[in-house]
Amino acid sequence: MKRHNFSAGPCVLPREVIEKSAQAVLDYDNGLSLIEISHRSKAFVDVMENARALALELLGLEGKGYKALFLQGGASTQFLMVALNMLEKRAGYLNTGTWSAKAIKEAQIYDDIYEVASSKDANYNYIPKGYDIPTDYDYFHCTSNNTIFGTQIKEFPDCPIPMVCDMSSDIFSRQLDFSKFDIIYAGAQKNMGPAGTTLVVVKEDVLGKVSRKIPSMMDYKVHIDKSSMFNTPPVFAVYTSMLTLEWLKNLGGIEAIEKENEKKAQLIYSEIDLNPLFKGFATKADRSNMNATFTLENEDLKETFDTMVKDAGINGLNGHRSVGGYRASMYNALPLESVAVLVEVMSELERKA
Ligand SMILES: Cc1ncc(COP(=O)(O)O)c(C=O)c1O
C-alpha cells in the first residue's frame, strides 16, 4: 500500500534522495561505504563544501558575508549557542510556542531575557504583531514556524538589531529576504535531511562582540575557521542533506517549491474550513503552510476517522499533546497527491457521518 507520510519530523524525504544515500552507505568511494571513509578524505570534504555552498545559494546569501555550518546537537543546542555567542547585556525574544519558550529558557541561563511579545495567553494559536524591539539590545530572536501549534510568521519585522531565527520547520520552503537575518538555524530533520545535523547560517560580522570565553564546540568562529570540520561531522546526515538540497535546486529552488507548498496548504485549509466536522486550531492569518493543526468538532467520530486514516495509508497525523487533534505536516518532499488523499478521507467522513 502507498504510504502518505505526514510526520512532523523526522519526516518524508524525496525517494530518490533516500535511494542515493542508501546506495552510498553500501558503496561510495570505490567499494568503501560513505560511513567508513575519513571525514578528511577528499570524497567527504567535497560533500561538506558542496552542502555548505548549496545552502547559501538556495537562500540567496552567496557573497553576502554569510557562512553555512553543519553542526550537531540539534536545533536545541542552538538555543544556548546563540546566547553564548551573541548575548552580552540583554536580548529580546518573541514567544510563539514551545520551541521559542525553550530557546528563552536556555538564554535565561546567561542573562535576563526580555519577551517582546507572547501568544501564550491563547495557547499559541496566533503570532503577536505590532511589538517594539528595543534598539539597544544585542539581538532579537524569533521562530519562523511553530511546528507544534501550526502558526507561521508571514511578515518579519524590520529589525533594528541583529535578527536570529529558528527556521527548523520551514527553511527552504518559501521565499524570504534571508539577508534580513543575521543567524538562521534549522535542524535538518524536516526540509533538509535525516536527524543528526543542524544547519547554521551566520553573518560573520555579528560575531566577536561578547566578552565571555566561549567553549570551542560552542563557538561559531571556531567552526567557521575549521570549515565546519572542527570535530568529526555527522557524515551521513550531511551527505543526505546535500542530496536534498541538490534535489531542491534541480526542481527550481525555493521559488518552485513554494508554489507546491501553497497548493498543498490551500487544499487542506479549504477542507478544514468547508467541512463542518473539523475546526482549524491556528488563527487564519497566521496559519502555517508546513503544519496544519485541526481538531474534530465531535470527538465521538475519532475512532472512525482514525481507522479511515489508517486504511488510507496515512501516517503521522496525530497532533502534539499540547494541541490535541491532528497535525498534517506538509514538508517540501510531501507530494500534493498525499494531501489530496487526506482531504478525500476528511470529506468521506462528512458523507458518512
Ligand atoms: C521550530 C523547532 N525548533 C527546534 C526544534 C528542536 O529541534 P532538535 O530536536 O533538532 O533539537 C524543533 C523540533 O521539532 C522545532 O520544530
Image: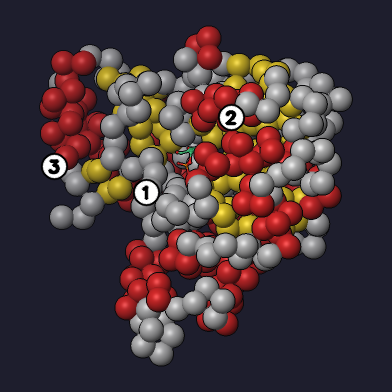
* Outermost residue toward the bottom in this view: 30
User: Which kind of residue does numbered mark 2 sit on?
Assistant: Glu
* Nearer to us in this view, 84 or 287: 84
Q: Is residue 117 left or right of residue 6?
A: right
Which circle's residue, 2 or 1, is located before the other in the chain? 1
* Outermost residue toward the right in this view: 136
Label at residue 266 = none
Looking at the picture, how far across and down is residue 178, in whole percent?
Answer: 71, 47
Q: Are marks 2 and 3 in contact (CB under 8 Å)?
A: no
Q: Is residue 286 left or right of residue 312?
A: right
When the figure is inspected, residue 186 is found, relative to residue 91, above or below; the finding is below
Q: Residue at x 47, y 39 (%)?
A: 290
Residue mark closest to the camera, 2 vs 1 = 2
Which circle's residue, 1 or 3, is located before the other in the chain? 1
Q: For mark 2, what is the residue?
A: 106
Which circle's residue, 2 or 3, is located before the other in the chain? 2
Q: For mark 1, what is the residue?
A: 11
Residue mark closest to the camera, 2 vs 3 = 2
Q: For mark 3, what is the residue?
A: 311
Q: Residue at x 45, y 26 (%)?
A: 149
| Number of residues whose C-alpha sits closer than 10 Å to that of mark 3, classed few (under 14), some (14–19) or many (20 or more) | few
User: Which kind of residue does numbered mark 3 sit on?
Assistant: Asp
Q: Residue at x 74, y 42 (%)?
A: 213
Under tag 3, what secondary structure?
helix
| Number of residues whose C-alpha sits closer than 10 Å to that of mark 1, classed few (under 14), some (14–19) or many (20 or more) | many
* Nearer to us in this view, 94 or 25: 25
| Number of residues whose C-alpha sits closer than 10 Å to that of mark 2, classed few (under 14), some (14–19) or many (20 or more) | many
Looking at the picture, how far across and down is residue 218, in whole percent?
Answer: 64, 47
Residue mark closest to the camera, 1 vs 3 = 1
